[in-house]
Image (cartoon, rainbow, N blue to C red):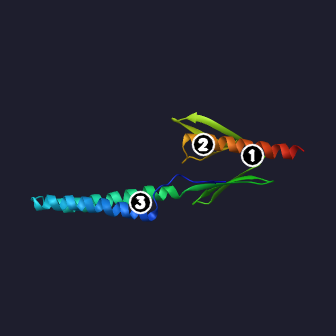
């Protein structure tokens, strides 16, 4: 299972958005300079740069994802791009949906360890993922008992 945040803007779309915003700011600064505000273009460049950096950082935060793999020996959660990998024994892992901090937290718990997954998902998506994981783990555990 791949968990990824919702992203509606492509890299190309981000570039176009930044260019349009920068053009609007610079046109407004040009009008201000024309009317006598000589510092308007300088502040416009600073503002356009800050907005471009902020939008780029926010867009890059959408690159994070989680890959959940269930096989006969482990339930593995790999966090990308950091490549952090956490393994649980699939028979003992429990899926918990806790409310706290104004949102639901989806936790995998086993042997005293807890791992929060799907932080970037909405509450509805976390609830659906919780249901799917519980069904998958129940099927796996019932197959192990046979």
Question: Earlier along the polypeptide chain: callout 1 or callout 2?
Answer: 2
Badge nearest the viewer, 3 or 1: 1
Q: Does the rendering let one see residue 55?
A: yes
Q: Which residue is mark 3?
A: 56
What residue sits 21% from the left and 61% below the top? 27
* Mark 3 vs 1, N-terminal side: 3
Residue 136 point in image, percent of width and height: 74, 46
Residue 113: percent from left, percent from top? 69, 44
Where, quadrant-wise, is the N terminus in this rendering?
A: bottom right
Tag 3, which secondary structure? helix
Nearer the camera: disc 3 or disc 2 = 2
The residue tagged with tag 1: helix, strand or loop?
Answer: helix
Q: CA distance from mark 3 to mark 2?
A: 26 Å
Residue 136's tag is 1
In-image side of 92 versus 80 (left or right): right
Residue 113 visible, this orientation: no
Q: Is residue 16 left or right of residue 103?
A: left
Q: Secondary structure at mark 2?
A: helix
Return the mark for residue 126.
2
């Amino acid at each position: 299972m791949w968990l990824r945040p919702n992203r509606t803007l492509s890299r190309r779309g981000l570039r176009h958005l930044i260019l349009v915003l920068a053009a609007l700011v610079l046109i407004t600064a040009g009008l201000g300079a024309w009317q006598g505000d000589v510092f308007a273009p300088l502040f416009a460049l600073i503002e356009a740069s800050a907005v471009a950096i902020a939008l780029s950082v926010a867009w890059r935060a959408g690159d994070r994802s989680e890959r959940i793999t269930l096989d006969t020996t482990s339930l593995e959660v790999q966090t990308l791009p950091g490549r952090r990998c956490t393994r649980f024994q699939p028979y003992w892992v429990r899926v918990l949906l806790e409310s706290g901090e104004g949102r639901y937290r989806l936790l995998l718990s086993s042997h005293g360890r807890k791992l929060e997954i799907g932080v970037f998902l909405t509450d509805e998506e976390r609830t659906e993922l919780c249901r799917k994981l519980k069904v998958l783990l129940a099927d796996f555990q019932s197959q192990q008992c046979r």
